[in-house]
Amino acid sequence: MERRTFMEIIGAGSLILPPLACGLRRPVAAGPTFLDGIATTCELCPNKCSVLAVVKDGHITKLNPNPDNPKSRGMLCARGNAAVQQVYDPDRLKQPLIRVGARGEGKWRPASWDEAFDYTAKKLSDIKAKHGPEGTLWSSTEGFQEIFFKNLGQAFGSPNVMRHPSLCLASVNLAYSMTYGTVPSFDLLNADYVIMAGANRFESIITPDTMDLIGGTMERKAKLIYLDPRFTVTASKADEWYPIKPGTDMAFILAMMNVIIAENRYDKAFLESETVGFEQLVEHVKPYTPEWAEGETEIPAQDIARIARAFADAAPRAVFYAGRRSSWYQNDFQMRRAQALLNAIVGNWDRQGGMVPNQKIAKGEFLVLPWDDPKAARVDEVEKAFPLASAKDGVYLPLRENLLKGQPYPVKGWMIYKQDPLHALPDQGKTMKMLDQMEFVGVIDIAMSDTAWYADVVFPESHYLERTDPIEVMPGIWPAAVYRQQVVKPIHDTKPCLEIAQGLAKRLGLSDYFDYTIEQWVEAEAKELPIQNGLEHMKQRGVVAVSQPKYGTTRNPVHRFLTKSGKIELFSDRLKEAGHDPLPVYTPPVQPSGGRFRLVLGRKATITHATLTNLPWLHEHNPENDLWIHPEPAAKLNIQSGDLLEVSSSVGQVRIKARVTQEIRPDCVFMLHGFGKKSPWLKRVHNVGAADSVLLETAWDKVSGNAAMHETFVKVVKA
Ligand SMILES: Nc1nc2c(c(=O)[nH]1)N[C@H]1C(S)=C(S)[C@@H](COP(=O)(O)OP(=O)(O)OC[C@H]3O[C@@H](n4cnc5c(=O)[nH]c(N)nc54)[C@H](O)[C@@H]3O)O[C@H]1N2
Ligand SMILES: Nc1nc2c(c(=O)[nH]1)N[C@H]1C(S)=C(S)[C@@H](COP(=O)(O)OP(=O)(O)OC[C@H]3O[C@@H](n4cnc5c(=O)[nH]c(N)nc54)[C@H](O)[C@@H]3O)O[C@H]1N2
Ligand code: SF4
Ligand SMILES: [Mo]
């Protein structure tokens, strides 16, 4: 694609959506597709939008959005478009590599796949002989081939299969599960009143919420109230923006409940029939008045009271939106529980424009030979320390603490799939120590990430446009099953994760667990799709979806919520039994002292986490990160935009340029993720800007074990 065309598509600085999406206001029912291309599914972030890839003479020339998918609403964002460039990126991994110099020295020798498999299998077998299979850690982030990597770790016998949620959304998921027995979606397409607290939907894209919010606020005029210490793009599109004092959202929510209950604006019939613990909640929120909350949040009491009334009046078409990345504070679970309770008392559950339990699309499953359960307990001791958390996903930061102490047993091998722990975990120095104490580190990636740079063997996975992956069901109000099929043959010596797992399995004596092809796997899944000739349909269209959402499926007298009481639990006995507050109790956050600032994090529409900053089309939009600082403290510190700063926390120090802006509160600073790379192969961002993970301190939420990434205070001086 011509560069100019691409720039036209992504626009300049606006919300980054191609023209088709802007013209598309409603979910598209399955119908004829007027766009050409091979149907597949984007892998550049967790949304998995549907794509039609245009191929000319064996070369991908363009990616179009596929309007069949009601979840992606005919949208393909700037990152999704830039995937073309990723395939042909000269900086991508092109063949297996084995380290020859010291770790991090950057001396590699290209290896054949046989060599890379033999070498890795020998190392893993040696560790198993010495420490047992539990002496290995298998960590990964979501992706359609992640299942094969997890299966290999489990078949190997390790209990230490560690997924990403405890860096991302574990606390919000647990809060809604403990309350409703499930994690719902929010019907932004039909809501009349939306409150978002630090859910930066116009930059942190979640489908279909981002597109529905555009429809909602710009076309349908639904009210959007937005709380964020920063003036984000979402703030700029909101009806009201409040630069809330960080860490005080729970005070705002409790005060809203105080008003709604005191003024009898709650849904009495719903509370009586569907919930337990309302009497306790009534007593609990009495002290939390708007006047009290004003002192905590710095949001005027009259605004809190007015918003509470308007929210209750608009219900059930009113939502306090849950947010996605809930790795904020040490009381994150309880803050999200407070949101869940606020939604419950206005009765927006399972109603159009409210909070709706997710629907799914049926699909088949390929049955693999079962392996034995691991003999050892997990090294993160999740069952003991966080009995309510998801034991199968684990808790990453407590795991790192234990691992560094060698407790309860040593872990000496680390296999990593589609994850960059040096950037994804707070305190990069500590993660580096964790890498250092490993006898073996193997990374499966598409790029030479920083973690790959410190590995012993790097396995290049084929790009998503070069692979066929399992069919995945994306649950939601408009659920979809999506398919990723190979668009072009791998252009370098790369393999999909399944074949990497099979290569290792063969040498580890585990081949029986991987005795199938991706085609057989997909065929088994497609057989039970609710459509005729499922596989053929998927190859042609890439999507099976519902044309209309279902509301109210759980609003009937026989429905039981998947909680202990079978009802929505406002007061939670299970929390009490586990030693936690059964109703959310507010504790004021510790404030930065001694001229320090709270470091807050967030995203931009053209970056995914710590990646894509090296890709030319996107790099142009994000050449370097900088530190947002308010003009008042900047003046005191004699800092001007562009000045080089030294920013330090108790665990690290970075140099980064200043951006003096009123778009942030005076007590916070902010920087984007994805810069200050150690890997010289990411040449545009190698030593450019700074990595937030260097500064972030280790802290986690007490109930879920989710990382708490807004608890770090930093000192800022001119360099
Ligand atoms: N400091 C800080 N830490 C954070 C966050 C933050 O905002 N700031 N956000 C948190 C959140 S919400 C999340 S979800 C996590 C995400 O944490 P990570 O999953 O580590 O996120 P990414 O930076 O996207 O890194 C993914 C890696 O996968 C590689 N990759 C991409 N596509 C493929 C593929 O198809 N196959 C393979 N094998 N590899 C691929 C990329 O090159 C990259 O090295 O980070 C968490 N940690
Ligand atoms: N473009 C893009 N889109 C993405 C992703 C991506 O990497 N890039 N990643 C996807 C993933 S995995 C996730 S988890 C989601 C994350 O999406 P979100 O859940 O929206 O999270 P963040 O973008 O990290 O935004 C957090 C916001 O909270 C604000 N904030 C900080 N402290 C407080 C506070 O105390 N109170 C309030 N009210 N606000 C606060 C920050 O300033 C920031 O703007 O985005 C998804 N979508
Ligand atoms: S939001 Fe963008 S990057 Fe994420 S899946 Fe969709 S098109 Fe791809
Ligand atoms: Mo995330």
Image: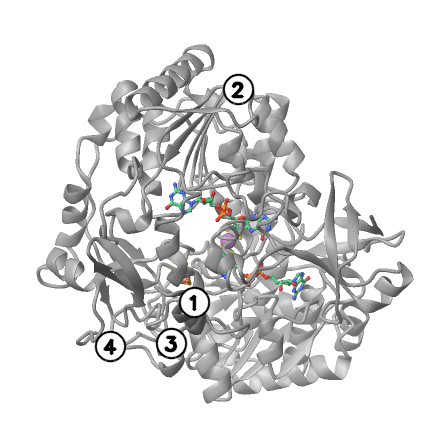
Amino acid type, residue under disc 1 in the picture: Ser
Amino acid type, residue under disc 2 in the picture: Gly
Q: For the residues marked 4 and 1, what is the alpha-carbon distance in whole angstroms? A: 20 Å
Vertical position of residue 536 compared to residue 73: above or below: above
Q: Earlier in the sequence, mark 4 or mark 1?
A: 4
Residue 397: quarter of image:
top right
Q: Is residue 55 visible?
A: yes
Circles 4, 2 touching at the beta carbon (< 8 Å): no
Q: Earlier in the sequence, mark 2 or mark 3?
A: 3
- Label 2 element class: loop
- Image coordinates for residue 697, horizontal then vertical, percent: 70, 42
Circle 3 is placed at which residue position? 21
Q: For the residues marked 4 and 2, what is the alpha-carbon distance in whole angstroms? A: 56 Å
Residue 225: quarter of image:
bottom right
Amino acid type, residue under disc 3 in the picture: Ala
Residue closest to the eye, 322 or 351: 322
- Label 1 element class: strand
Q: For the residues marked 2 and 1, what is the alpha-carbon distance in whole angstroms? A: 49 Å
Q: Earlier in the sequence, mark 4 or mark 3?
A: 3
Q: Which of marks 2 and 1 is nearer the N terminus?
A: 2
Q: Residue 101 carries which label?
A: 2
Circles 2, 1 touching at the beta carbon (< 8 Å): no
**Residue at image x 38%, y 63%?**
81
- Label 4 element class: loop
- Label 3 element class: helix
Circle 4 is placed at which residue position? 29
Amino acid type, residue under disc 4 in the picture: Ala
- Image coordinates for residue 4, horizontal then vertical, percent: 42, 69
Ligand 3, by image quadrant, is bottom left
Q: Earlier in the sequence, mark 4 or mark 2?
A: 4
